[in-house]
Image: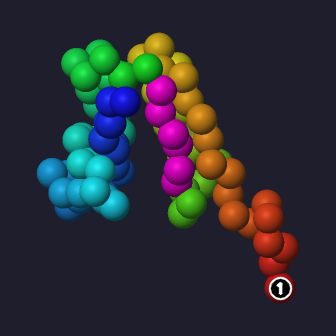
Amino acid sequence: MARGGAAGRQSRRLGREMNGIPILGALDRLPEQAERLGVHHAIVAMPNATHQQRRRAVDLCTEAGVAALTVPDSTIWWPAR
């Protein structure tokens, strides 16, 4: 099974690793990175992002022909106190 990398929104994380997975580039570059690396699937896990930011990530995946799986916001499971 091929293992991929992550795309980040924060430039200070580029070139680093997150849980052993390399951060390959900025989210804006996802379409070109996906083509270069032959990516077919992506998991969109952005717990601190707004709905619009998560939607943008999914739209970039769609633009790149990458199937996107999303991890919902944790507030769906745990009600506010």
- Mark 1: give few (<14), some (14-19) or many (20+) Cα within 10 Å: few
Q: Quadrant of the N terminus?
A: top left
Q: Is residue 32 visible?
A: no
Q: Quadrant of residue 18?
A: bottom left
Q: How is the image coloured?
A: rainbow
Q: Residue at x 22, y 18 (%)?
A: 36
For this orientation, the residue located farthest to the front is 1
Describe residue 26's horizontal placement relative to residue 60 as left or right.
left
Q: Which residues are magenta?
A: 41-46
Q: Residue at x 28, y 56 (%)?
A: 20
Rendered location of residue 23, percent (x, y): 26, 48
**Residue 43 among magenta residues:** yes
Describe residue 51's horizontal placement relative to residue 31 as left or right.
right
Q: Which residue has dot 1 on it? A: 81
**Residue 57 among magenta residues:** no
Residue 81 in the image: above or below residue 41: below
Rendered location of residue 59, percent (x, y): 54, 27
* SS assignment at label 1: loop
Rendered location of residue 40, percent (x, y): 43, 20
Secondary structure of the magenta portion, mostly? strand
Q: Residue at x 24, y 41 (%)?
A: 25
Residue 56 in the image: above or below residue 48: above
Describe residue 7's horizontal placement relative to residue 75 as left or right.
left
